[in-house]
Amino acid sequence: MDSSTFKEKYIPYHQKMFRVAYRLVEDVCDAEDLVQETYIKMWNKRDDLLLVDNAESYCITMLRNLCLDFIRSRARHPSQSSEDLQIADKVEIVSEIEQKEDILYVESLLKQLPEQQQQVIKLRHFDDCSSEEIEQIMGLTSVNVRVLLSRARKRIKELYNVSR
């Protein structure tokens, strides 16, 4: 990817990225630094960016991850002020919220699968059942369980890529 394509595709998200960073770190200078760091990382991975379907989502996700890393690193420093402690609490809350959102999102994807695929995925990944246990519970052969798991995972990936 050349610089003009990069600028055309990713620079328009600068203001939105800044707002997201500022909302997370609550400091103008740090927010701007994190946005710049995001652009640098993206530029260094510019060949991989050709495969990105949703440029805005990619920018925001990378920025959010950098912000959370930044907040965590600030929270680990020994000289913590009350403001730093509040930031650490905020990171914890953000992580919990993201985790809950992810769980709800995965559950919504699961509901779009056929019933047997839903059951196999839930037994395997939520109830930690082995393939043998799933065979016994559902009365299926090992081949059927593997095929159902494979198809369900593939469909979840497809649904995830379409919606994100």
Image (tube, rainbow, N blue to C red):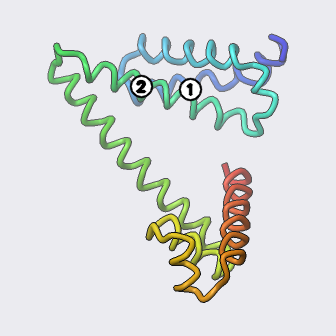
**Residue at left 49%, top 54%?**
102
Q: Amino acid at mark 1?
A: Met
**Residue 33 x, y percent position in the rendering:** 49, 11
- The secondary structure type at the circle numbered 2 is helix
Task: Indicate whether 112 appears above or below 49.
Answer: below
**Residue at left 33%, top 20%?**
73
- Left or right: where 104 falls relative to 43: left
Which quarter shows the N terminus?
A: top right
> Which residue is under mark 2?
69
- Left or right: where 98 falls relative to 137: left
* Disc 1 residue crowd, few under 14, some 14–19, many 20+, Cα 10 Å: many
User: Which sits in the foreground, 25 or 130?
Assistant: 130
The CA distance from mark 1 to mark 2 is 16 Å
**Residue at left 76%, top 16%?**
7
> Which residue is under mark 1?
17
The earlier-in-sequence mark between 1 and 2 is 1
